[in-house]
Amino acid sequence: MIVAPKIRGFICTTAHPTGCAKHVAEQIAVVKGRGPIAGAPKKVLVIGSSTGYGLSSRIAAAFGGNAATIGVFFEKPGEADRCGTAGWYNTAAFENEAKAAGLYARSFNGDAFSDAMKAEVIAAIKADLGQVDCVIYSLASPRRTHPKTGEVLKSVLKPIGQSYTNKNLNTGTGAVTEVTLESANEDEIAQTVAVMGGEDWEMWIDALLEAGVVAEGTQTVAYSYIGPELTWPIYKNGTIGRAKEDVERAQRALDAKLAPLGGKAWVSVNKALVTQASSAIPVVPLYISLLYKVMKAEGTHEDTIEQMDRMFRERLYNGANPQPDEVGRIRVDDWEMAPAVQKLVDDRWKIVNTENFGELGDFEGYQSSFLRLFGFGLSGVDYGADVDVGIGIPSVPAVA
């Protein structure tokens, strides 16, 4: 079938298999172009590996460090007349590229929050790798079925304490509007922490440790974001920020659990980028558009692959200089948060409106980055050609 982008709100309901493969290939080229990562891990588990920072982490580990990788995600395959998800096509492309490079790659599609998935992955590690020496936790989901209670928990993106009004970007039209978000109640806060906090990361590492599949010196990393003060009511001081505080609680607990093995747990604070997760957060798309304009002009803009390559190459391995902040977090948002960058963004935020947004913001860059997530807008892809939307992932059994 011929696949075109169909956008509904902040999601695209179609994905292009060939375009996704091109996007993966471009990321691989970035990593390979920077040369091997000395001292990189060789057996890497990525939980949440099919899109965004998780996918880029898997690519950086595999093609920068020649690592064997196991990826876990929840995606949908295509059918005869319906597209699969971008993450499905990304993973199919990654596995094909890994196989061509002689690299082990195995993927698991299902509920990463479940005990059953943890057991299945652990069995594969035992059978194929023996142990893992790096665990990346990059899971982003709006809901979670708790593996112990069976309760279905849902996250919300809301401020805490009082309602919040600020500028917002209509990502379909480019209009700068205003959004008001009502404050979360205590149950919404608790459910968001349960979905997006650190409990599942801790459960994964606990299960891996109990099974004896964690190698000496293993490092594990979970991803977070802080951002500038103008986003704090909806992010850092909102429900998602409360969840990220719980991720930092889990990091401290896991640090202690890994210490006997000479291991380490980290929280990496990454740059604001267009991802499937960030597109859903009010206020943030307008901030990202202004940020892109400033950082591209300064030559410091990075996408997810440059961020993850830099994290592996400059902070975790290759001589290891983590440069932790005052509370021990790795900061690869350092270029974003440079005072000169933030001052320019803040100055423009104060005056941006629909009329001057084209001058002050990078709307074209935002839209391009968004579409690329789903395999659209990549050079060298014939979007008018018929494409097989039913392609499979080599290591994932087909569903009858």
Image (spheres, rainbow, N blue to C red):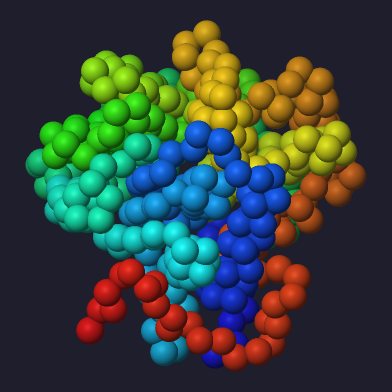
Quarter the C terminus occupies: bottom left
Residue 251 in view of the camera: no
Residue at position x 63%, y 49% in the image: 31
Residue 210 in view of the camera: yes
Residue 30 lies left or right of residue 57; in this view the side is right
Residue at position x 32%, y 20% in the image: 262
| Residue 274 % position (x, y) | 62, 48
Q: Quadrant of residue 9?
A: bottom right
Q: Residue furthest top?
A: 326
Residue at position x 44%, y 26% in the image: 267
Task: Looking at the picture, tell me which residue is in the foreground, 163 or 52.
Answer: 52
Q: Quadrant of residue 252?
A: top left
| Residue 118 % position (x, y) | 20, 48
Task: Looking at the picture, tell me which residue is in the foreground, 248 or 212.
Answer: 212
| Residue 282 % position (x, y) | 57, 41
Q: Quadrant of residue 22?
A: bottom right
Q: Total number of numbered labels?
A: 0
Residue at position x 58%, y 39% in the image: 37
Residue 393 lies left or right of residue 300; in this view the side is left
Image vertical order of residue 359 relative to residue 212, above or below: below
Task: Looking at the picture, tell me which residue is in the foreground, 49 or 294.
Answer: 49
| Residue 312 % position (x, y) | 54, 35
Quarter the N terminus occupies: bottom right
Image vertical order of residue 314 relative to residue 394, above or below: above
Image vertical order of residue 226 relative to residue 66, above or below: above
